[in-house]
């Protein structure tokens, strides 16, 4: 079988951990492989078409809409997706604008109509950051067409280093992205003064109603210069997915390894404070059992046996 993180960096690390732990308990001749991906709809497609047995999708809450047939993925069979576990990552999608513009709110942005350049993730049908960014802007009455209409422009990247990097090097005046625990945001604030915009309640309510996307709080301590905490779109957690026909023993073993061998993966992040870690430790099986889509029977069997459901 193949336990696959459709993405890079931390998704590969999670995959290596689970493959090693499962391999130590699997029968003779068992083999594991990791296929590269991006952690978005490609993770869903790879599971549904049988290319892989399991994948990691980011962010976890967004999978609910996909399974319900309302989200970014429009292909067949999304209702066959099942969850193994939620792997914790405390993250948010944030908007930051160069403070020289004097923009401190979405209302300020609507009124001032500055001809700024925004760095965003590509909305190409796979990247969940780009998909969420454009839906957030639309809900706020600040679509790309609206911003371009007053002289603004957009530049695109894929990952934190090449999207936030566009603001770091001065190509962009603003950036909309996640991965708030990474050093790229620190480097950006070292280079230039940035103002982080809270997202209006009505915008977050609209996204919750239409897509089931939750809101989250950015604490005052997260970024330099914040005068208070603020609300924005939650972008937390990795969801370990499979298809409904995955062998129940394999699904159970995968869940057991994810919950019973947490120390193996946690020690790889102990050089970072929990709030700065791309995988938020300590991993709590009770929280891992809270999944945004229905659980595979093998996973549910484990959680029920441990009294976690």
Image: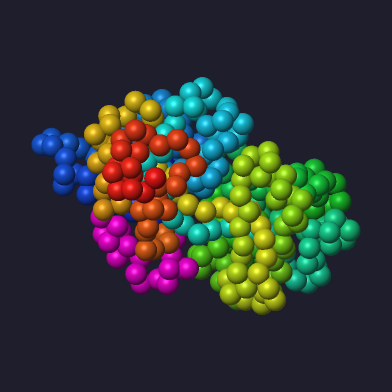
Residue 156, compared with residue 191, is above or below; it is above
Q: Residue at x 30, y 48 (%)?
A: 306
Which of the 4 image quarters holds residue 116? bottom right
The answer to whether residue 267 shows anywhere in this view is: yes
Q: Residue at x 43, y 65 (%)?
A: 277
Q: Is residue 288 left or right of residue 152?
A: left
Find the magenta span and give its range.
261-278
Pick out the residue farthest to the left: 28
Q: Is residue 307 left or right of residue 218?
A: left
Q: Is residue 62 left or right of residue 8?
A: right
User: Picture coordinates of residue 209 (x, y %)?
Assistant: 68, 41
User: Picture coordinates of residue 3 (x, y %)?
Assistant: 31, 40
Q: Residue at x 54, y 66 (%)?
A: 184
Q: From the image, which quarter does the C terminus lie in? A: top left
User: Picture coordinates of residue 140 (x, y %)?
Assistant: 77, 49
Q: Residue at x 52, y 32 (%)?
A: 67
Which of these two is toward me, 193 or 24? 24
Which of these two is toward me, 136 or 191? 136
The answer to whether residue 299 shows anywhere in this view is: no
Which of these two is toward me, 267 or 253? 253
Which of these two is toward me, 98 or 218? 218
User: Picture coordinates of residue 262 (x, y %)?
Assistant: 29, 57
Residue 272 within the segment the image draws in magenta: yes
Q: Is residue 110 left or right of residue 199?
A: right
Residue 248, compared with residue 229, is above or below; it is above
Residue 67, compared with residue 178, is above or below; it is above
Pick out the residue farthest to the front: 307
* Number of numbered markers: 0
Q: From the image, which quarter does the N terminus lie in? A: top left
Residue 15 within the segment the image draws in magenta: no
Pick out the residue farthest to the right: 111
């Amino acid at each position: 079988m193949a336990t696959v993180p459709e993405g890079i960096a931390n998704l590969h690390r999670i995959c290596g951990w689970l493959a090693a732990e499962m391999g130590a308990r699997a029968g003779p001749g068992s083999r594991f492989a990791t296929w590269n991906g991006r952690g978005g709809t490609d993770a869903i497609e790879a599971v549904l078409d049988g290319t892989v047995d399991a994948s990691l999708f980011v962010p976890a809450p967004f999978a609910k809409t996909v399974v319900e047939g309302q989200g970014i993925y429009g292909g067949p069979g999304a209702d066959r997706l099942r969850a193994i576990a939620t792997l914790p990552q405390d993250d948010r999608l944030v908007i930051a604008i160069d403070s020289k513009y004097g923009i401190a709110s979405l209302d300020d942005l609507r009124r001032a109509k500055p001809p700024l350049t925004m760095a965003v993730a590509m909305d190409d049908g796979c990247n969940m950051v780009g998909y969420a960014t454009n839906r957030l802007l639309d809900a706020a009455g600040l679509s790309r067409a609206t911003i371009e209409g007053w002289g603004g422009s957009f530049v695109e990247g894929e990952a934190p280093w090449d999207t936030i990097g566009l603001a770091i090097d001065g190509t962009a005046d603003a950036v909309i992205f996640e991965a708030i625990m990474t050093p790229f945001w620190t480097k950006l604030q070292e280079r230039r003064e940035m103002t982080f915009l809270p997202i209006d309640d009505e915008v977050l309510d609209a996204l919750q109603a239409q897509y089931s996307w939750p809101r989250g709080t950015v604490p005052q301590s997260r970024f330099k210069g914040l005068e208070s905490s603020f609300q924005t779109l939650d972008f937390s957690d990795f969801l370990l997915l499979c298809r409904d026909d995955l062998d129940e023993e394999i699904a159970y073993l995968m869940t057991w390894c994810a919950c019973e061998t947490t120390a193996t993966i946690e020690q790889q992040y102990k050089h970072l404070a929990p709030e700065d870690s791309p995988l938020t430790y300590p991993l709590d099986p009770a929280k891992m059992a809270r999944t945004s889509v229905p659980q595979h029977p093998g996973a549910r069997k484990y959680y029920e046996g441990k009294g976690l459901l």
